[in-house]
Amino acid sequence: MNLTARTKLASGTVLYMDYGSKEMGNHEGMRKGFGEMCGKIFARGINLTARVVPGGTHSEASWEKQLPFVFHTLMYGLE
């Protein structure tokens, strides 16, 4: 979690993060760690969309399905 504190991100930065539910089942404590990291990012004033992807895995096929969410987050408010 030190990386979250050390990273130089300006307030107002927009981030998208997700984690597949099938990934979390493979790693002890990952759900808790993901939540803690998101909390630290929010506390810094960073705009974050964070989600647990139902059935998601750590694979390119799963990441590809998340692109609409990523683009919606990063382009929100742009016209």
Image (cartoon, helix red, strand yellow):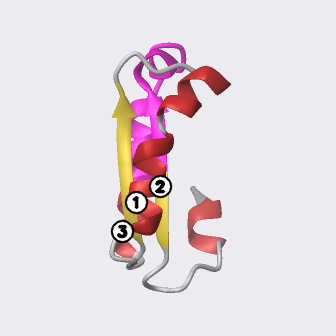
Question: Where residue 35 sits in the image (x, y, percent)?
Answer: 36, 46
Q: Name above or below for residue 47 compared with residue 63.
A: below
Asked if marks 2 and 3 touch (Cβ < 8 Å), the reply is no
41 or 59: nearer the eye? 59
Q: Is residue 74 visible?
A: yes
Q: Which residue shows up at 40% across the image and 46% down it?
A: 69
Find the magenta span and give its range.
Answer: 17-38
The N terminus is located in which quarter?
bottom right
Q: Return the mark for residue 71.
A: 2
The C terminus is located in which quarter?
bottom left
Asked if marks 1 and 3 touch (Cβ < 8 Å), the reply is yes
Q: Which amino acid type is shown beneath numbered disc 2? A: Phe
39 or 22: nearer the eye? 22
Task: Report the residue marked by disc 1.
Answer: 73
Task: Report the residue marked by disc 3.
Answer: 76
2 or 21: nearer the eye? 21
Pick whichever of labels 2 and 3 is earlier in the sequence: 2
Q: Which amino acid type is shown beneath numbered disc 1? A: Thr
Question: Where residue 25 sits in the image (x, y, percent)?
Answer: 45, 14
Quarter of the image for residue 51 reads: top left
Inter-mark Cα distance, 1 to 3: 5 Å
Q: Which residue shows up at 37% across the image and 56% down it?
A: 49
